[in-house]
Image (cartoon, rainbow, N blue to C red):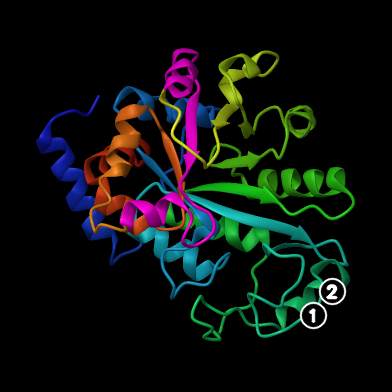
Amino acid sequence: MIRSSAAVAAVAVLLAACAGAPVAATGPAAGEALTSRFDCLRQDEALLVSAHRAVWDASTPENSLAAIRRTGREIPGVMLEIDVALTADGALVLMHDDDLDRTTDASGDVADLTLAEIRRARLTDATGRVTDEAPPTLAEALAAVREVGGVASIDFKIEDDADRLFRAVVAAVREAGMQQAAVLIAPSRDAATTLHRLAPELTLSVPLRAAGDLDGLDPARVLAWTGTSEPRPELWTALAARGVEPMFGTLGRAGRRLDDRYAADGDPSEYAGLAAQGVAILATDTPGAVRQGAPDAVARASACLVR
């Protein structure tokens, strides 16, 4: 386990160096469960950053290849959460909203447009600047995640046919060979059961309110999503005792999310406190602030995952 200040300092140098250069992808051993790679997060009080919609800052459009690459360069081994929807012709495209209006220079519902029509749109960043990038396909996004050595966390944007979307995403992950570098976000316990049946080799993020909710699930394939409201250290301890990595979110609506509350005084050290209390994976809208507030814990996560 990495505990010494020298080791943490060495990884901090890695973090700084990777901010300006691509990270060589280094995958896990064949057949290794993704959750087994995360064991050292619990053991070392490390904090893996999960970048919401892959965004690094306002200059990187959400759910874009630019965001994946920038965030992946900034934090080695980072988890990159992306949203996936089906187009009218059955293609998988990255898009959070039901329509293109907020995040591109075009309009229309994703489910009513073909991939070719969507690809004519151009993504906008948080400032409203129109970029040169079209909404990427899931295959392109997975290739970019592999390129930076990160972990893809895939959220399903479901219209009418959840099973069709689940099956298409599972097929895409397998086609990309990303089974040991992708997490599927189950929107419910029932969805987790369906996804595990479809892809027993894949790791799932499952919403849990108590450690007993693990009953009937395979802990070796589960990350425990514990919400975004208030820290729950007792639950995190109980989950860790069962060998499951707790996830927590500081993301949400601007002005109300914990990310903003932690940043209000200019000292986001609360993130380090979350790691000390047992959070292994932190979903955030401000990954740079997490790195600032918990540099040692984030460095330990990079050391744990990048090999």
Residue drawn at the location 51% of the way across and 28% of the way down: 35
Residue drawn at the location 33% of the way across and 22% of the way down: 43
Q: Is residue 33 left or right of residue 303?
A: right
Measuring from the top left, give residue 292's x and y in whole percent: 25, 53
- Residue situated in front as seen by the camera: 306 or 165: 165
- Residue situated in front as seen by the camera: 66 or 297: 297
Indicate yes or no whether the magenta region holds residue 235: yes
Quick one: SS at disc 2?
loop
Measuring from the top left, give residue 147's x and y in whole percent: 47, 57
Badge 1: few (under 14), some or many (20 or more) residues near its Cα, within 10 Å? some
Asked if 180 appears above or below 73 in the picture, the reply is above
Q: Amino acid at mark 1?
A: Glu
- Asked whether the viewer can see residue 203, the reply is no
| Residue located beneath label 2 in the image | 113
Q: Tell me the magenta residue range.
A: 234-263
Q: Are marks 1 and 2 in contact (CB under 8 Å)?
A: yes
Measuring from the top left, give residue 70's x and y in whole percent: 41, 65
Residue drawn at the location 43% of the way across and 20% of the way down: 234
Q: Amino acid at mark 2?
A: Leu
Quick one: SS at disc 1?
helix
Residue 117's disc number = 1
